[in-house]
Image (cartoon, rainbow, N blue to C red):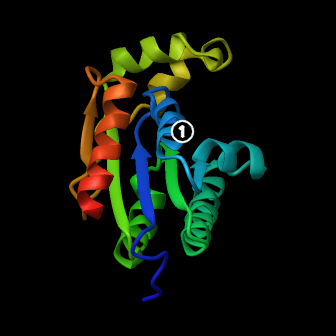
Amino acid sequence: MTLVGNASTRLVIIRGDAASGKTTASVELRTRLGGRVALIHQDQVRREMLQNGDRLQRSHDASVLIVSMARQALDLGYDVVLDGIFNLRDYSEPFELLYAEHLGVTRIYQFDVGLDETLRRHAARPLGSVVLESKIREWYDGWQPLPWHQETRVGAEVTTDELVTLIVKDLDLTAG
């Protein structure tokens, strides 16, 4: 076991389907937390950093890089916010290890907004005209709970402000 971070570092993982609101919430959370915060977007790593025609291999490789970056940022004393789809195949085991080895507070949230709301949100964002609805339907997994942790479920009725306020409160309560 390799311990990571310190008693004052905070790790937040925000998971869920494409277009569910993860990135919007994570960007607002970084602003609200202030101070030293590393925001690591799965899409940035998977789509921008890595080029590999093998989608499954790229997803696995992204998980290795994301967890490595999170560990390094925590060790440097940053709070870390991870956001992404984070499928169980590639992320459950490394996230479980990161959770177990993190010395500070870790909170995990998963969006579960339903397919209709996911499609509505996708249509309203800039990528809505680039990524077809059929792709969003194909990628949609719905509720995929981690087998080792009871993450907080985020439904369609929860606004970004309500979620970020909840996360900040959860971090403060857990740290105190």
Q: Is residue 96 above or below residue 152?
A: below
Q: Amino acid at mark 1?
A: Thr
Q: Is residue 52 visible?
A: no
The quadrant of the rendering that contains the C terminus is bottom left
Query: Residue 19: image x %, image y %?
Result: 49, 26
Furthest toward the left, the residue is 150
Q: Is residue 160 above or below residue 30?
A: above
Q: Residue at x 60, y 15 (%)?
A: 128
In the picture, measured across the screen, residue 24 lies left or right of residue 162, that is: right
Quarter of the figure with residue 98: bottom left
Work out whether residue 138 or residue 37 is closer to the camera in this orientation and state it. Answer: 37
Q: Is residue 80 above or below residue 100?
A: above
Q: Is residue 30 visible?
A: yes
Q: Secondary structure at mark 1?
A: helix
Q: Residue at x 69, y 51 (%)?
A: 54
Residue wearing tag 1: 31
Q: Residue at x 61, y 72 (%)?
A: 76
Work out whether residue 19 or residue 21 is closer to the camera in this orientation and state it. Answer: 21
Q: Residue at x 46, y 16 (%)?
A: 121
Work out whether residue 148 or residue 140 is closer to the camera in this orientation and state it. Answer: 148
